[in-house]
Image (tube, rainbow, N blue to C red):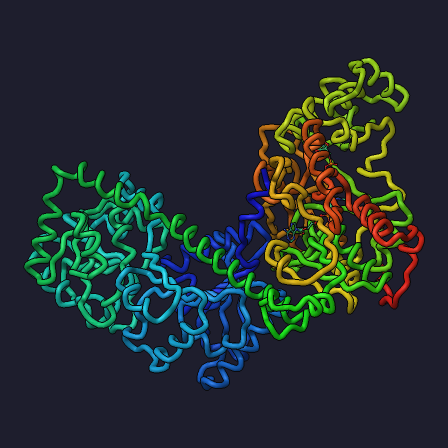
Amino acid sequence: MGTEETMDKHELTRDLICFSHLRWGFVYQRPQHLISRFARHLGSKGGRVFFWEEPAYGAETPRLHIEVCAASGVLVCTPQVPHGIEEDELNGVLCEMLDDLIGRERVNDFTAWYYTAMMLSFTHHLRPALTIYDCMDELTLFQGAPPALRERESHLFQRADLVFTGGHSLYEAKRAQHHSVYAFPSSVDIKHFEKGRNDLADPADQAAIPQPRIGWCGVIDERMNIELLAGTAEAHPEWHFVMIGPVVKINPATLPDAANIHYLGGKQYGELPAYIGNWDVAMMPFAHNESTRFISPTKTPEYLAAGRPVVSTSIRDVVRPYAENGLVHIGDTVAEFSAGIEEALGMNGSRTGWLMKVDDFLKDMSWDGTWSAMAKCMEEKLEEKRRLRAAAAVAEIVGSTAAGAPGLYTSRERERHAYDYLIVGAGFAGSVIAEQMARNFNKRVLLIDKRNHIGGNAYDFHNEHGVLIHRYGPHIFHTNSRDVYDYLSRFTGWRPYEHRVLANVDEKLVPIPINLDTVNKLYGLSLTSDELEGFFSSIAEKRDPVRTSEDVVVSRVGRELYEKMFRGYTRKQWGLDPSELDALVTARIPVRTNRDDRYFTDTFQAMPVNGYTRMFENMLDHPNIHTMVNADYREVRDMVPYREIVFTGPVDEFFNFRYGKLPYRSLQFKHETIDREWFQSAPVVNYPNEAVPYTRITEFKYLTGQQHAKTSIVYEYPKAEGDPYYPVPRPENAALYKRYQELADATPHVHFVGRLATYKYYNMDQIVAQALATVGKMVGARRAELIRPQGELKPALSA
Ligand code: FAD
Ligand code: UDP
């Protein structure tokens, strides 16, 4: 289950900033395909993608305009600046705008993705976790390319961790300049362009153009062989040439003007299949000049996906592989180009076989595939960098001159530099122990977490809209332990909060835990509390002993309510029937005969007033605690000297799954922000119906008390694979855990604490109590000594 995958799965950065010379709203091409996929992927994990465009001139005073692209979630950032602004001043202004954005939005773990090296002029001070140069074209050879571009590009080569090229020729040209260059030829949105094979209605402005039609779709600029177009049109007045796309950089007056050449202007990406699908032949009359030497035209596979025969000039990346595979006709002179078109027009009879060949060729060319392969490269590079960074950080922390070479310590040095504790995992378990050991017992602690943040599953942060959200689903603090509450109160003030949940059952929203209102609403009754007890007795099924999660509910409220409210939810959440799960799972949810609709009845119910992450920061703010994120135990354990370990990760993973994997249930979180003040009528709405794929929707502002014009929600989709979140309480798992526990008990100098390491379905307060108890055992102290503050503490913020 989750563990092995978690160990082997790497992550991209949280955010990404793309620096582009092409505008987001210009033609829909490589940047839009790739960057919108990043936006979807990172967005699902609470990350953001910023698309930084070239400045727009004409504003009175400089300002950054940010617009969310509704379809992808990309945040399009357009600097608006006054006309005539000098280059130096402009760079200063852009730099300030960018820093301001990064500070305001707390962008601190990000990838910088460049389409143009020119933007290094105001971005060279950034410290991205990863720098990518996605080299689409040989821009230095384009008309009007700034002289500084070549020099800037060489700087970008020095800074980039990875260089991707948009084609094979470009790869050949660039690969000697960088250690990690990968060719990622442009791909095709097959599903989109395939629509062109259906009989789509001819768009109004094309409908009147006679056939046969030879079409072009793309930017019309210096790459176009104007003479070839004019000559072919003149030689074949019976053919009609349809030109779709904006005219850029060249004077429109230089374009050939003929009765059979029709300029229809730029079109939306969504409209293209209808235009292309109504042509007879698609063409690429590219000139042979500096700007086309390395091009790898995306429209080749797009035309083919739309089922159109293609005629092109002999552009290298078109000849190989397309023409060599018999998919494209090639011709450079008017005569050759015309012959290609004639051949293409005469293809009718052999079309089916040709289309099969096309489809076979295109099947490995999806943008999804290209994007995934790029993301994989990036993950691997990040992992390599993280490892190096961890080594450097460790070397710096222990003050060694032999950076990253721990083997070089003498045993005496090791002893002198050694941490008292290496604590693995910066969630509640690890952080409480770090805090106690450092502040109460003056121990030196290295606290590491493989994630890029502290707080474990309780981590919260302000998303790109400024709404405070919990990355790993709703975390509500509740406890009956005054000790635990008092202890945490040293690091945070509280906002009183009593949690309430509604369940969506039979298209009604009813309180869960089941109470008097739940029953009356579901059955259209008006029972009193006393009557409800009788009602339950009449429908309850006797179970003796009460062993499973099914027994718990059915023996209290009968089968129907069990099926409506518990069976489906549990089957989704755990991938098991309640009859296969320990009683303790559903026993978490009480049944009430009064109208109390609170989810918890604990004495203390509150939320940290500035969020959990802030509370963790206060907890760990001590000179004896060194915290390292992005650091996996396996990388750090041999690099740093320490005396003992506290391990809060999955216990089976620690022992390399010696007895097999312990099942942990996982979740996928789908975060969304909606442009209205509220989304639903309760903090959490549960969906027990098995036909709905998620279990619940949480609306964070109810939990945090934040006021905001927008609202952020999260859907939880249960999964077997992925990060380990829930130990699965059932007898065989308990037996397997017991074997690991015996191993753990027999492992000297390692302490296992927390939900994953002790395989217990514990809430946050129980973990705090468990961690405090462990500290007590480790140092032989009594609980009161732990809770009483010893060292200097900053006063906690109050509500
Ligand atoms: P974690 O918070 O899981 O921390 C363990 C840390 O160890 C992780 O950050 C992990 O990255 C790190 N780690 C693991 N392996 C390694 C390694 N090899 N190297 C480095 N680091 C490693 N509790 C409540 O009280 N109220 C709630 O409302 C509530 N809601 C919840 C909702 C969800 C969806 C989930 C999943 C849990 C919820 N909980 C709730 C439970 C709560 O999250 C846990 O009790 C608590 O976070 C456990 O703390 P921990 O330190 O044991 O583990
Ligand atoms: N449960 C259910 N229906 C609900 C709420 C909970 O069947 O509407 C069951 C389900 O098995 C769930 C368990 O009760 O996993 C515990 O719920 P809780 O809200 O405590 O889960 P957690 O917050 O730990 O995910």
Quarter where residue 64 is shown: bottom right
Q: In which quadrant will I find the C terminus?
A: bottom right
Residue 795 x/y as whole percent? 87, 65
For this rendering, which residue is in front, 558 or 430?
Answer: 430
Residue 588 x/y as whole percent? 78, 33
Q: In which quadrant will I find the N terminus?
A: top right
Quarter where residue 582 is shown: top right
Q: Is residue 436 above or below residue 768?
A: below
Quarter where residue 364 is shown: top left
Q: Is residue 398 above or below residue 497?
A: below
Q: Is residue 779 above or below residue 546?
A: below
Residue 77 x/y as whole percent? 51, 66
Residue 664 as seen in the image, left or right of residue 797: left
Image point 32% across, 60% down: which residue? 266
Residue 194 as seen in the image, left or right of residue 724: left
Image point 60% across, 43% down: which residue? 656
For this rendering, which residue is in front, 391 or 429?
Answer: 391
Image point 37% across, 80% down: which residue? 151
Residue 358 x/y as whole percent? 23, 43
Instruction: Please give the count of numbered marks on the rendered protein.
Output: 0
Residue 107 appears in the picture as rendered: no
Residue 346 appears in the picture as rendered: yes
For this rendering, which residue is in front, 565 or 448?
Answer: 448
Residue 710 as seen in the image, left or right of residue 308: right
Q: Is residue 132 above or below residue 729?
A: below
